Amino acid sequence: MDKLYIFDTTLRDGEQVPGCQLNTVEKIEVAKSLEALGVDIIEAGFPISSPGDFNSVVEISKAVTWPTICALTRSVEKDIDVAAQALQYAKKKRIHTGIGTSDYHILYKFNSTQEEILQRAIAAVKYAKKYVEDVEFYAEDAGRTDNEYLARVVEAVIKAGATVVNIPDTTGYCLPTDYATKIKYLYEHVNGIQNAIISTHCHNDLGMATANTLAGVMNGARQVEVTINGIGERAGNTALEEIVMILNSHKELNVQTNINTRKITSISRMVSSLMNMPVQPNKAIVGRNAFAHSSGIHQDGVLKNRESYEIIDPKDVGIDENSIVLTARSGRAALKHRLQMLGVELKDSKRLDEIYEEFLKLADRKKDINDNDLLLLAGKERAANQ
Ligand code: KIV
Ligand code: ZN
């Protein structure tokens, strides 16, 4: 199996979201949990952006041992100087520098030319190399960059010493087939590409971040840039938990990560609460309903064999068990199962039918049926069992 490096940017791209800002102590708490989760690289911040960000990169570098600590910069010498200073205590360090390569960036943001941007990219990588061995280059808006020019940039920065080259779909515009073709094109056209790791960094504006990341991996990318719960600018970034569980569920892809999946739910809840960012109930892997079954047909199937309607064992992501939610759409099997869990044994199927009738009337009136409601409905049997 090939190793896929997990680069977590919850504390940089994720933390840029308005209302999600964390203080240094909270960032250290998240960084230590990311370390325990098994991420390979933690992007700890953008040190030139504020003294608070600078300080967080310093403190995270001191607090964390195993993952590489990464700091973001623009292709500007001062940014790189400050990032190198912020990383001084990191046991393993990386500078992540880069520049916009699409025409939107070259013409409108920089009022420049492709040639000039290429030279600035090379110069930034060479400058960062003076401080650290591990330099990652990002070609911002690579998703909308012409592949031929992108290949020239990638080749040049690898030649200048970049160890990782990041191909961001900054605006979340690419279709999975476009992103797949882009990565494939780079592997086919860039001399020396084997000397660097190609990284994905996909945004979710059209809901395709995970699909695009997977397309990148299936075409040779061996680092993915992700965040917990998919938080990030606008519609967010690729969710770490989604890409990791896809690879865990599809072993035929032959790619593995170092993530301890049993810690996924706890870190998801921690990030959601620290960042004041609720997780949508139907969010894949970490949403409240991700392992909840509410319709009668599904409940019956799951009670007979979990795998009829579950492709992931909830225990694999740190949840004790799936939940069978009792609603007006639940069937007798689910009701009987829940009553048994509550210690209520019914003497025959006629009695189950009676309680089920009462249960349906109640469920029509009340959205959530709780255990107390069920115990009241099964009053007689409870008394008999006691
Ligand atoms: O989305 C993006 O292009 C970025 C880069 C700065 C890596 O976040
Ligand atoms: Zn981004």
Image (tube, rainbow, N blue to C red):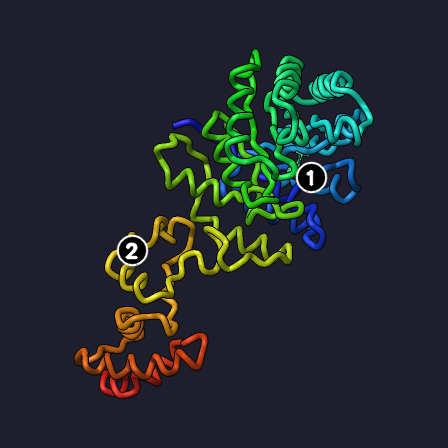
Q: Residues within 10 Å of mark 1 (few under 14, many from 20)?
A: many
Residue pictured at 35% horizontal, 33% vertical: 252
* Front one among 8 and 238: 238
Residue 91 position within the rendered picture, expressed as x and y whole percent measured from the top left: 61, 30
Residue 149 position within the rendered picture, expressed as x and y whole percent measured from the top left: 66, 19
Would residue 286 be visible to someone looking at this image?
Answer: yes
Q: Is residue 70 left or right of residue 382?
A: right
Residue 1 position within the rendered picture, expressed as x and y whole percent measured from the top left: 38, 28
Name the N-terminal-most of marks 1 and 2: 1
Q: Mark 2 CB in 8 Å range of ligand 2?
A: no
Q: Secondary structure at mark 1?
A: strand
Q: Mark 1 CB in 8 Å range of ligand 1?
A: no
Q: Is residue 349 left or right of residue 143?
A: left
Count of numbered circles on the image? 2
- Tag 1–tag 2 contact (CB < 8 Å): no
Above or below residue 379? Residue 341 is above
Q: Amino acid at mark 1?
A: Gly
Measured in 3D between alpha carbons, the distance from the residue under mark 1 to the one under mark 2, in whole angstroms, is 42 Å
Residue 355 position within the rendered picture, expressed as x and y whole percent measured from the top left: 28, 82
Image quarter (top left, top right, bottom left or bottom right) of the C terminus: bottom left
Q: Quadrant of residue 146?
A: top right
Q: Quadrant of ligand 2?
A: top right
Which residue is label 2 attached to? 306
* Front one among 112 and 253: 112
Which residue is label 1 attached to? 45
Q: Residue furthest left?
A: 348
Above or below residue 385? Residue 306 is above
Q: Amino acid at mark 2?
A: Arg
Checking the image for residue 366, the label placed there is: none
Residue pictured at 70% horizontal, 30% vertical: 88
Residue pictured at 70% horizontal, 42% vertical: 56
- Please identify, in this view, whether the residue under mark 1 or under mark 2 is nearer the observer: 2
